[in-house]
C-alpha cells in the first residue's frame, strides 16, 4: 500500500498542528515560580517548567524504546555488518552536511559553509550519494549546523525544555526550527509514501543501534535518567549555538524569568574569522 504526497503532507501538517497546540496548552499551564535544584533536579530544572508533562512523555518514550526500538536495533546490529551500518550513517550525514552549509551561510560563517559544500559535493559525486565518506579522507570536518542553532546565533534563547512523543528532547526554539530541519532528511524528496516511511525507519533504527552502548552506560550511572538526559541535552545545545565557547550559565537559583535567567532573546557573539567545527 502506498501513500500519496498529499497524504504525507496531511500527516506532516497534522503533527505540526498538534505540536503547536500542545505548546499553547503548556504555555497556559506554566508558572513563574522559583525552580531550584532538588533530589530529582539539576542545572536544567530552571528551564523545565513543564516537568510533570515532560516526565510522562519521557516514560512513554522509554517504554516504547524498551519494547520496540531497542530490541529491533539490537537485532539489526547483530544481523547487519558494521561497514553497512557505517555506510547508512554516512548517507544520512551527507544530507546533514548539505543542510549545514545553508545554516552556516545564514549564520554568516563562510569558511564552515564552504567546507560543508565541498564535503557534500565530494561525497555525493564520488562517494555514491554519501555512502562513502571520501571527504573525511581529505581532512574535511563535519559541522552539523541546524536551524535551531541558527535561531540561537540570531539571538533567540532556547526557551522551555520539552519532551515530545517519539521525537524526544527539544526546546521551544528547537521545536520551531523542526519543520525546516526536517528538510535535511532524504525522505522528504521521495514521492512514494512507503519509501519515505522506509527511509525514516531505517534512519531511526540505524541511529538507535549506533547508541546501544551509550544508552546502557546512562542506565548504569544515572540516578535519575530524565534529569541526566535533560541537562546533557540543554548543555550540548547551548555549546553548539556558541560553537563550544558558551558564556557562563546564569545562576541556577534565580527565578524563571528573573534578571539572571536565560532570556528568550540572547544574542550570540559575532562569528569568528576561522572555522570552529561542531563535532557530531
Image (tube, rainbow, N blue to C red):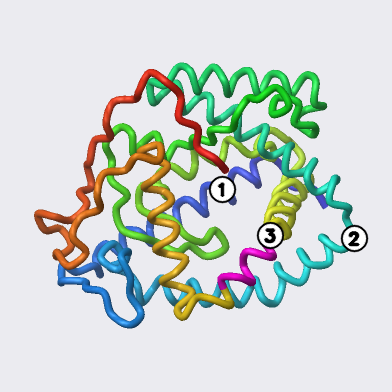
Alpha-carbon span between mark 2 and mark 3: 14 Å
Residue interval drawn in magenta: 211-218
Prevalent SS, magenta region: helix
Query: Circle 3 is placed at which residue position?
Result: 208
Task: Give whichever of discs 2 and 1 has the lower sequence position.
Answer: 1
Disc 1 is placed on an element classified as helix
Between residue 72 and residue 135, name the one nearer to us: 135
Alpha-carbon span between mark 2 and mark 1: 32 Å
Residue 196 place in picture, x, y as percent:
73, 44
Q: Residue at x 74, y 47 (%)?
A: 3
Q: Are marks 2 and 3 in contact (CB under 8 Å)?
A: no
Residue 14 place in picture, x, y as percent:
52, 53
Query: Circle 2 is placed at which residue position?
Result: 79
Residue 65 place in picture, x, y as percent:
65, 71
Q: Residue at x 35, y 23 (%)?
A: 272
Query: Circle 1 is placed at which residue position?
Result: 12
Disc 2 is placed on an element classified as helix
Residue 109 place in picture, x, y as percent:
42, 21
Amino acid at each position: 500500500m502506498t501513500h500519496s504526497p498529499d497524504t504525507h503532507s496531511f500527516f506532516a501538517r497534522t503533527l505540526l498542528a498538534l505540536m503547536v497546540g500542545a505548546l499553547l496548552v503548556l504555555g497556559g499551564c506554566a508558572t513563574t515560580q522559583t525552580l531550584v535544584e532538588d533530589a530529582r533536579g539539576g542545572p536544567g530544572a530552571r528551564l523545565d517548567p513543564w516537568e510533570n508533562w515532560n516526565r510522562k512523555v519521557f516514560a512513554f518514550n522509554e517504554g516504547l524504546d524498551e519494547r520496540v526500538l531497542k530490541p529491533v536495533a539490537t537485532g539489526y546490529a547483530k544481523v547487519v555488518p558494521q561497514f553497512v551500518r557505517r555506510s547508512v550513517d554516512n548517507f544520512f550525514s551527507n544530507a546533514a552536511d548539505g543542510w549545514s552549509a545553508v545554516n552556516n551561510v545564514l549564520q554568516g560563517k563562510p569558511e564552515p559553509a564552504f567546507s560543508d559544500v565541498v564535503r557534500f559535493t565530494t561525497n555525493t559525486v564520488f562517494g555514491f550519494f554519501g555512502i562513502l565518506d571520501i571527504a573525511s579522507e581529505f581532512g574535511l570536518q563535519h559541522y552539523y549546523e541546524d536551524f535551531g542553532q541558527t535561531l540561537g546565533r540570531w539571538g533567540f534563547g532556547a526557551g522551555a525544555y520539552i519532551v515530545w512523543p517519539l521525537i524526544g528532547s527539544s526546546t521551544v526554539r528547537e521545536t520551531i526550527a523542526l519543520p525546516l530541519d526536517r528538510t535535511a532528511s532524504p525522505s522528504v524528496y521521495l514521492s512514494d509514501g512507503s519509501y519515505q516511511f522506509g527511509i525514516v525507519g531505517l534512519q531511526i533504527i540505524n541511529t538507535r543501534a549506533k547508541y546501544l552502548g551509550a544508552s546502557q552506560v546512562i542506565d548504569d550511572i544515572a540516578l535519575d535518567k530524565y534529569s541526566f538526559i535533560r541537562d546533557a541535552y540543554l548543555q550540548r545545545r547551548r555549546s553548539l549555538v556558541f560553537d563550544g565557547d558558551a558564556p557562563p550559565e546564569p545562576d541556577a537559583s534565580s527565578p524563571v524569568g528573573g534578571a539572571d535567567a536565560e532570556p528568550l532573546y540572547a544574542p550570540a557573539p559575532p562569528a569568528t574569522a576561522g572555522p570552529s567545527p561542531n563535532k557530531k
